[in-house]
Amino acid sequence: MSTPQPHQNHTHTGVGHEDHNHKLVLTEDNERRIRFVFFLTASYALIQVIGGWLSGSLALIADSGHMASDAAALLLALIAYRMGKRPADGTRTYGFHRIRVLAALANGVMLLLLVVWIIREAIDRIHTPAEILAGPMLIVAVAGLVVNLAGAWILWSGNRGDSNLRGALLHVIGDLFGSAGAIAAAVGIMFTGWMILDPILSVLVALLIVRSAWELVKDSIHVLLQAVPRGVDARAVESGLAQLPEIGEAGHFHAWVLTDESIVATVHVSPARGVDPLSLPSLVSSWLKERYAIDHVTVQIDPPGQLDREHR
């Protein structure tokens, strides 16, 4: 339902300067954490290429591609932070904060594509097992486990409410499981000689990644479609506002997520008999912030009976 254009006899008012500040705080600490993990991941991807070439291990070389794609995703997240710091202008009045959501969506899609690639490679290796030197593979995999543990701890200690950092954390967790799987495969191959252990563990790692990646994609699309934030029911909000003694009618409620930290909403209300219309914006703003954590509200005051006539 679209919000109708205000009639000439409507009063349109905001809720105060503090509620119309679109400038959101980007966490410098999160950006610093992702930057450090990016250098760790990119460096280890290079080590994997060298280790795979020296040992003749196709598994390590393939996993280096995994690490390289994750390093690219981390770099994308860093670019998103930089873009998000740009101030709002006359064309982009909310600034560039949605770029962070786009980056999170790209990270999730990359993870899903990576899962498809891992499964395809695993199927090929089951049919045509590759010779793996388990000793060098184990050494490089242990080094990878240490690197990924450090990266996961660094990101886990940050603000996980940030979708960009959450996407980066998911990539590193995927790498962590990959390293653990590589260690298990290397040890298993050393003791049994079963080369098939490598592709089987790769599929298990891929299945662990799928659910988290899909949640990241779904949440990002939810934000980009400007769907009502989770936990907010538009009809329940209108009904709750209408029950306040100062408000005669409430309708045309719309709400959407600007970024991880900010929810924006608009709503039409009309005053009850004898109530000053100019007192309603602050009342509505406080009510929505207290119950739904909505921190930016634009309130339009309609004449008594106007909303009721529009709904007929």
Image (tube, helix red, strand yellow):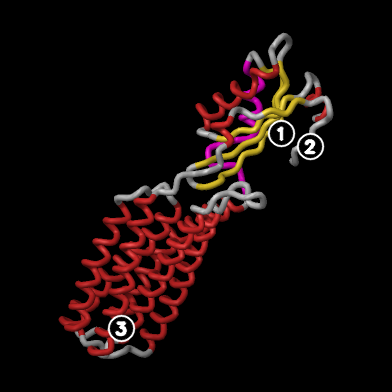
- Quadrant where the N terminus is found in the figure: top right
Amino acid type of the residue tagged 1 in the rendering: His
Q: Are marks 2 and 1 in contact (CB under 8 Å)?
A: yes
Cα–Cα span, label 3 and label 1: 57 Å
Residue that carries the numbered disc 2 in the rendered image: 4
Amino acid type shown at disc 2:
Pro
Give me the C-alpha separation between circle 3 and circle 2. Answer: 60 Å
**Residue 50, quarter of the rendered image:** bottom left
* Figure check: 312 above or below 247: below
Q: Which residue is mark 1?
A: 252
Q: Secondary structure at mark 2?
A: loop
Quadrant location of the C terminus in the rendered image: top right
Q: Is residue 229 above or below residue 127?
A: above
Q: Which residue range is magenta in the image?
A: 226-244
The percent coordinates of residue 180 (x first, y second) are 25, 69
Seen at 59% across and 53% down, the residue is 224
Q: Mark 2 against mark 1, which lies toward the viewer?
A: 2
The image shows residue 99, relative to residue 63, as above or below, that is above
Q: Position of residue 79 (x, y in %)?
A: 46, 63
Q: What residue is pinned by disc 3?
A: 49
| Secondary structure of the residue carrying numbered label 1 | strand
Q: Is residue 309 magenta?
A: no
Q: Nearer the viewer, residue 49 or 98?
A: 98
